[in-house]
Image (spheres, coloured by chain):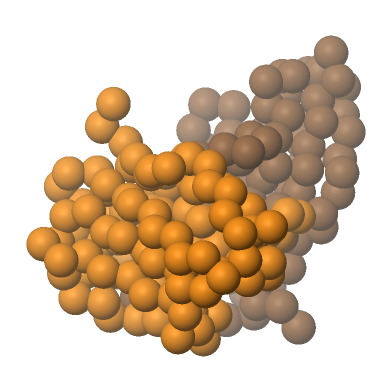
Chain colours: A brown, B orange
Amino acid sequence: QKEVEQDPGPLSVPEGAIVSLNCTYSNSAFQYFMWYRQYSRKGPELLMYTYSSGNKEDGRFTAQVDKSSKYISLFIRDSQPSDSATYLCANGGATNKLIFGTGTLLAVQP
Amino acid sequence: DTGVSQDPRHKITKRGQNVTFRCDPISEHNRLYWYRQTLGQGPEFLTYFQNEAQLEKSRLLSDRFSAERPKGSFSTLEIQRTEQGDSAMYLCASSFPRGGGSEQFFGPGTRLTVL
């Protein structure tokens, strides 16, 4: 079992849709959770960072963590074609070494 | 631009050659990380530094790989006797720890192709 599991997609949605991206993790010792966006052939860009259960909102993005079920989600409201990218979830512990999922490829169709 | 920078952005080399990559972190960040990413996969941790001290190395980091951060600022990653399996994107990230954890900010990566 991988430490962080993520559906690779691809996920295709129409412009304006609400997108839901999900990951599960196995190591309870890793208490920090992040979502990155990565455009093709670019470095990952940090979108959301959280360390507690519950929701964290930033503009059109909401990160949700459920530590009891080891489940993390990213919701994108009013999706735009410019949101088309690979979304990576990651979690980390005290050493800050991040464990990443494989990434979900998202395509937002205009 | 005050983000993480990496040089070169692309490197093509022949099998058996040595290559060296450089990473300049965000100036006030004292932690620096190296990751490797292959097509269709998420980044995989290689090693990290706090200031000039290398504090953790992954088992992925074979003895052909060496990383340094001599003055606690920029870092270099050298791969000796490159193999085709070393072809990947090499990513550098930096952070400034706060509390028990912190955000890591990534550079644009160095794409290595070994022929």
Q: Position of residue B39 (x, y in %)?
A: 73, 54
Q: Is residue A12 above or below residue B67?
A: above
Horizontal side of B34 relative to B73 (left or right) equals right
- The residue located at (21%, 65%) in the rendering is B69
Q: Position of residue A32 (x, y in %)?
A: 45, 64
Front residue of this view, candidates A35 and A84: A84
Quadrant location, the C terminus of chain A: top right
Q: Is residue A86 above or below residue B70?
A: above
Front residue of this view, candidates A10 and B51: B51
As drawn, the residue found furthest toward the left would be B71
- The residue located at (38%, 43%) in the rendering is B7
Q: Is residue B41 above or below residue A29?
A: above
Q: Is residue A36 above or below residue A18?
A: below
Quadrant location, the N terminus of chain A: bottom right
| Quadrant in which residue A7 is drawn | bottom right
Q: In this view of the protein, can residue A101 be seen by the observer? A: no
Horizontal side of B111 relative to A9 (left or right) equals left
| Quadrant in which residue B15 is drawn | bottom right
Front residue of this view, candidates A62 and A44: A44
